[in-house]
Amino acid sequence: MADWGLVVIAVVLFVLSTSRLLFQLLGRNRIVEFGNMQTSGVSILVHAIIYFGLITIFLIAIGVHIYTG
């Protein structure tokens, strides 16, 4: 039996938190920008911190597990 919880949660969070896909925090002109195709270094750092926080909550605090087999 394989635990796919880590893989599924990580991929979903990565797709949703990718800068400029849905929204961008700390954009070049405004704090929140939608559909912007330019990413700043600060925005990448903020999205990485949010991603780390959410994946920690889902995998360690809540303990999401998806078993196959």
Image (cartoon, helix red, strand yellow):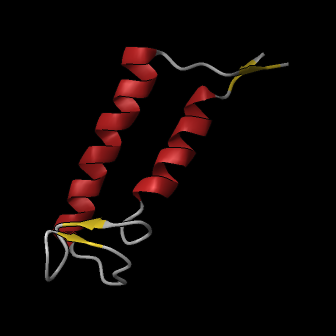
Residue 58 in the image: state x and y as whole percent: 43, 26
- In the displayed structure, 69 sits above or below 19; it is above
Residue 52, by quadrant, is top left
Rendering quarter of residue 56 = top left
Question: Residue 36, relative to residue 69: is it above or below?
Answer: below
View extreme (right): residue: 69
Task: Give coordinates of residue 8: x percent, y percent.
Answer: 61, 38
Which image quarter is the N terminus in?
A: top right
Residue 38 shown left or right of residue 26 in the figure: right
In the image, what residue occupies the spot 16% across and 81% down? 28
Q: Is residue 41 left or right of residue 13?
A: left
Task: Give the quarter of the figure containing the C terminus.
Answer: top right
Q: Nearer the viewer, residue 29 or 68?
A: 29
Residue 10 placement (x, y as % from top left): 51, 41
x and y, in percent, of residue 49 in the image: 24, 46
Q: Residue at x 34, y 45 (%)?
A: 51
Residue at the location (51% across, 56% down)? Answer: 15
Rendered position, 22 above or below 34: above
Indicate the quadrant where residue 27 lies.
bottom left
Q: Is residue 61 left or right of residue 41?
A: right
Residue shown at the point (21%, 56%) measured from the top left: 46
Q: Count numbered badges in the picture.
A: 0
